[in-house]
Amino acid sequence: MKVNNKLLNMFGQVLNSASHAITKMMYKQRFFLLVLPKIANAFEIMKLDNNAPQEEENQSRKANYLTALAEMLVLIPKQVLLAQFSSLMPLLLQSLHSTVPSLLLSALSALLNLIQDAPDLMNSYADTLLDNFLSLLEFKGNMSVRLKAVTCIGALTLLPSPTLIPMKNRVIKSLCHTLDDRKRSVRTEAAKARSEWCIVGT
């Protein structure tokens, strides 16, 4: 993960033009396009692997793959991400079914960025995203996962109103339960998200 980050950034002592490092045009895009198919292929292989004893190891590997992917997503131009949207979404949606907090947080962060940057493209995934986000409101293993899920639910209000109106009552009702979360930061974010959903369609 750290290696990816350094390859895609100018590194202070070595990887920069001042030290005569050779950087080709669109090197970030090239690196991303080289790595993304490998990650997608690895996910597909692990999905087909039904060996129960290896499940925990596979989950850990998935978390590592997605964390590396999330690190790249932050640094890749929006146009490139949108061009690879169809390849990215299956990886991110599959990751939401994990029980590994680090994997869930990486997936939620990437999805949050996509919702904010490309709401029109995410519109067709609204139902699937909402189902997954709402289920993660009950995640017991990590408060940060619940907090990020609430933030994503609030961000969904960026989608077109006709898509959101049928979901409105369900979301508001679900967020009412989250207002009783034992963590104050989750309750605060839930109140904010609920307010945003209350004005949908008005």
Image (cartoon, rainbow, N blue to C red):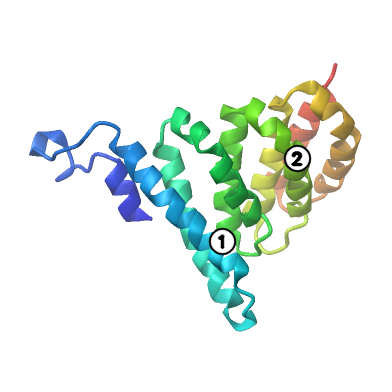
Q: Is residue 15 visible?
A: yes
Mark 1 sits on what residue?
44
Most distant residue in the bottom direction? 53
Identified at 65% across, 60% down, the residue is 142
Q: Quadrant of residue 8?
A: top left
Q: Badge 2 is on which residue? A: 190
Q: Is residue 91 above or below residue 202?
A: below
Residue lying furthest left in this view?
20
Q: Position of residue 83 (x, y in %)?
A: 50, 33
- Amino acid type, mark 2: Ala
Please give left or right for residue 50 compared with residue 198 in the image: left
Pointer 1 with pointer 2, Cβ within 8 A: no
Q: How many residues crowd around disc 2 within 10 Å: few (fewer than 14), some, or many (20 or more)?
A: many
Residue 82 at x, y percent in the picture: 52, 32
Task: Look at the picture and state if 63 lies above or below 172.
Answer: below
In the rendered image of this protein, does residue 26 appear above or below residue 177? above
The residue lying at 62 percent from left, 33 percent from top is 115
Residue 62 placed where, x, y %?
Answer: 53, 63
